[in-house]
Each structure stands twice: as C-alpha cells, then as structure tokens.
Image (spheres, grey):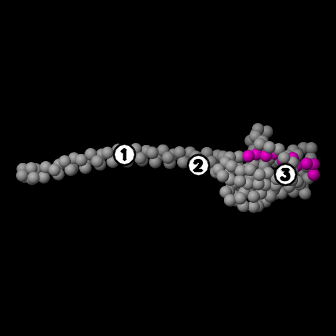
C-alpha cells in the first residue's frame, strides 16, 4: 500500500486541482443562477406593468377613472385623418358636431400590432379588442345633445417601438 502512494503521487495533485476546479465552477454557477433569477423577476415585473398598461383598454363599457384628467396630445374635428406611431399611448380629441348618427373610425395599424380605443362620456364605447395589425374599422352611436359631450377621445397604444398607424374618424351619419 505504501508503494502505491509513492508510485502515483501525481494522482493526488490531479484530484486536488480537479476538486478546486469543481468548487470554482459551482461558485460561478451560483452567480449565474442568481443572474438568471434576477432577469426572470425583471421580465415578470415588465409583464405585470404591461398588463396594467392595457388593463381596461379593450373593455367596451368600462368606465374611465377621472376622464377629465386624460392627457390630450392633439384636438381634431371629425373627418380628420391622423397618422403617427411609436411606443406608448397617444390620445387625440375629436369634435363630433351637433348631428347624431353612427361614427365610423377606419384605421390601418400596418404591420406591427397596436390597439385603438374610443372613449366617449367617460366610457369605452368602441375598441379594436386588443392589439391588431392591418386595416379595419370600428363604429359607435353618437347622440348629440346638450346633456352629452360633443367630442370623443381616440386612444392608440403600442407596446413596442417602430410602429406606425393612421386612422380617419368620420363625422356622424
């Protein structure tokens, strides 16, 4: 047995360095797992923020909290064509006039999906029902009168950059 230790002395060094290598690998692996867990938690938080961003956006009939506090990017009359794009939300105000009727919104979301929501009198009255791409239209009934507002809001939202869209809000007919 004593002869074995002298004959294979190099084996002890090999096992020693192998053990050191395994320990270093495990330490690096632990750091890598922590980084992966952190990335996973960050992704989960981003998804939760995205869900909150679109929480009531597609629910026709949903009441908008504090409709007077809606930040308006521009104001247009009906029969106005609007073009834009990009990440985030854009809200435009459209004057509808004094004639009651059906208002049709023709839109083109092109290739990257966006969503469009029509808000009237503090409620979502028409929606694209989520993110859509391509051409389509939505419509709603407009009742002109002293007790009702003479305008609506059009909210377009894009969850990613590089989008472009256009829409035409027709006057009531």
Q: Residue at x 75, y 58 (%)?
A: 108
Is 94 contained in the magenta span? yes
Q: Nearer the viewer, residue 83 or 44?
A: 83
Give x and y (percent) for residue 133: 70, 59
Label 3 or label 2, whichever comes before in sequence order: 2
Instruction: Give the alpha-carbon distance from disc 3 to disc 2, as whole Å.
Output: 35 Å
Q: Nearer the viewer, mark 1 or mark 3?
A: 3
Pick the residue in front: 32 or 70. Answer: 32
Percent x, y of residue 54: 67, 49
Residue appearing at x 13%, y 49% in the figure: 9
Marks 1 and 2, Cα distance to the nearest angstrom? Answer: 29 Å
Residue at the spot 22% in from the left edge and 47% down from the top edge: 16
SS category of the residue bearing label 1: helix
Q: Quadrant of the C terminus?
A: bottom right
Within the image, what quadrant is residue 138 found in? Answer: bottom right
Q: Can you identify the residue that label 2 sits on?
A: 47
Residue 173 visible in image? yes
Q: Which residue is mark 1?
A: 28
Residue count near mark 3 (Cα–Cα under 10 Å), binned few <14, some 14–19, many ≥20: some
Q: How many numbered markers are drawn?
A: 3
Q: Of the two numbered discs 1 and 3 on the same chain, state the one appearing first in sequence.
A: 1
- The magenta span reads 90-99
Q: Nearer the viewer, residue 49 or 20?
A: 20
Q: What residue is drawn where x is 75% and y is 61%? A: 135
What label sits on residue 109 in the rendered view?
A: none
> Is 144 on the left-hand or right-hand side of 154?
right
- Counting residues from the N terminus, which is met first, the one under dot 1 or under dot 2? 1
- Which x, y percent locates residue 155? 75, 48
């Amino acid at each position: 047995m004593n002869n074995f230790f002298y004959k294979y002395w190099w084996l002890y060094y090999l096992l020693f360095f192998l053990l050191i290598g395994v320990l270093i690998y495990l330490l690096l692996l632990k750091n890598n797992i922590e980084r992966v867990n952190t990335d996973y938690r960050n992704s989960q938080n981003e998804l939760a923020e995205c869900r909150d961003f679109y929480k009531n956006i597609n629910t026709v009939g949903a009441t908008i909290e504090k409709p007077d506090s809606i930040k308006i990017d521009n104001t247009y009359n009906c029969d106005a064509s609007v073009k834009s794009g990009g990440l985030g939300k854009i809200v435009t105000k459209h004057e509808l006039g004094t004639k009651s009727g059906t208002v049709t919104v023709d839109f083109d979301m092109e290739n990257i999906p966006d969503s469009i929501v029509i808000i009237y009198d503090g409620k979502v009255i028409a929606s694209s029902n989520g993110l859509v791409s391509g051409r389509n239209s939505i419509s709603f009934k407009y009742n002109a009168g002293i007790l009702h507002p003479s305008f609506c809001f059009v909210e377009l939202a894009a969850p990613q950059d590089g989008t472009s869209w256009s829409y035409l809000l027709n006057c009531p007919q």
